[in-house]
Image (cartoon, rainbow, N blue to C red):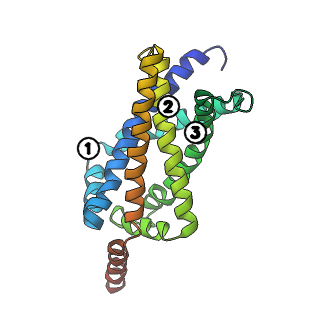
Amino acid sequence: MKGNSYLSRKIHSLLGVIPLGLFLIEHMVTNFSAYERGPQGFEDSVKFLNDLPLVFFLELFGIWLPLLFHGVYGLYVAYQSNLNTGRFQYGRNWAFALQRISGVITFIFIFWHLYQTRYQVMIGAVTHEELGNLMHDVTTNGFYFVLYVIGILAATFHFSNGMWAFLVSWGITVGPRAQRISSFIWIGVFVIVAVIFLLSLGSFKGDEFKEAASAALQLTNLV
């Protein structure tokens, strides 16, 4: 690992932006349809994604394999890191520490979320059309809801702060002024994306999804 650590870190950094950063934004937009247009809007967004051509290969090579590499290598980087915030208490050092901590939380959260959603679809426990109903059940559980809030904040911070670090490490924001401006931009992105995700999460708790879940259950009983 040490012999090719530079290349591995560059690949790890790049995958955090393309395609995983794009996947986060796509996920944000899809979930926000639940807030904007309710159960039917969310179902339509999910259907649109699953009707894409070669969707299995798009997800395999565009999401799952990059996510696996980025996550596993990220855990290795976090394990190797020296979190010395107690000695050097300044903003960037805290951001460095939080980047590692949020990465671990995000890795666990994503795979737990995938187990609750995608895996249940894969084994036939729920259909794509029932994902909104499933999320209603998840978000109305107080314990799960708190864990989702923590996971969302961790993931959005990890993405936003990771974008700041990506621009520095790839030589795009070189000077102090450029890095300071970049900090303000990505703090803004963190706030906006986190708020959108939290609004979407809260919408799944709404009566619309509760009624949709009840209607789906009644239809199943009739069949």
Badge 3 amino acid: Gly
Residue 78 appears in the figure: yes
Q: Are marks 2 and 3 in contact (CB under 8 Å)?
A: no
Q: Is residue 174 left or right of residue 215?
A: right
**Mark-to-mark CA distance, 1 and 3:** 31 Å
- 49, 201: nearer the viewer: 201
Q: Position of residue 164 (x, y in %)?
A: 46, 27
The residue under label 3 is: 103
Instruction: Tell me the SS state at disc 3.
Output: helix
Q: Position of residue 13 (x, y in %)?
A: 49, 26
Residue drawn at x 41%, y 36% is 21
- 69, 168: nearer the viewer: 168
The residue under label 2 is: 162
**Mark-to-mark CA distance, 1 and 2:** 31 Å
Badge 1 amino acid: Pro
Number of other residues with Cα within 10 Å of mark 2, as a class: few under 14, some 14 to 19, many 20 or more: many
First along the sequence among labels 1 and 2: 1
